[in-house]
């Protein structure tokens, strides 16, 4: 079997879009994709709860803003 080379998930390694409307369309596409893959509502909601708990933890790493000066 011949495998295709992996395509980048994020074009040009950035999620910055030309317009706010393109950004909203991208988020909508991502949400619809997740719902298309995960049909069970309970599993979908439990995953959200796990992510929320991870982000609310004081020890969890926070993403930094690209280009922002480090204090």
Image (cartoon, rainbow, N blue to C red):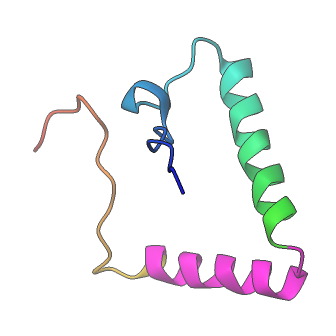
Q: Residue at x 77, y 80 (%)?
A: 45
Horizontally, residue 24 falls left or right of residue 69, namely: right
The percent position of residue 17, horizontal first and vertical second, equals 56, 20
Quarter of the view holding residue 37: bottom right
Q: Nearer the viewer, residue 36 or 53?
A: 36
Query: In the figure, 57 relative to 64: above or below?
Result: below
Q: Residue furthest front?
A: 1
Quarter of the view holding residue 20: top right
Horizontally, residue 10 falls left or right of residue 60, namely: right
Which corner quadrant holds the N terminus? Answer: bottom right
Q: Nearer the viewer, residue 47 or 34?
A: 34
Horizontally, residue 38 falls left or right of residue 15, namely: right
Residue stretch rendered in magenta on the structure: 39-55
Magenta stretch, main secondary structure, is helix
Query: In the figure, 31 relative to 70: above or below?
Result: below
The percent position of residue 47, horizontal first and vertical second, equals 66, 81
Q: Residue at x 71, y 87 (%)?
A: 46
Quarter of the view holding residue 65: top left
Q: Residue at x 29, y 47 (%)?
A: 64
Q: Residue at x 48, y 28 (%)?
A: 11
Which corner quadrant holds the C terminus? Answer: top left
């Amino acid at each position: 079997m011949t495998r295709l080379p992996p395509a980048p998930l994020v074009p040009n390694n950035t999620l910055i879009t030309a317009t706010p409307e393109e950004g909203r369309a991208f988020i909508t596409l991502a949400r619809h994709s997740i719902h298309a893959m995960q049909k069970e509502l309970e599993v979908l909601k439990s995953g959200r709860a796990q992510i929320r708990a991870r982000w609310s933890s004081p020890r969890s790493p926070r993403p930094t803003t690209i280009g922002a000066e480090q204090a």
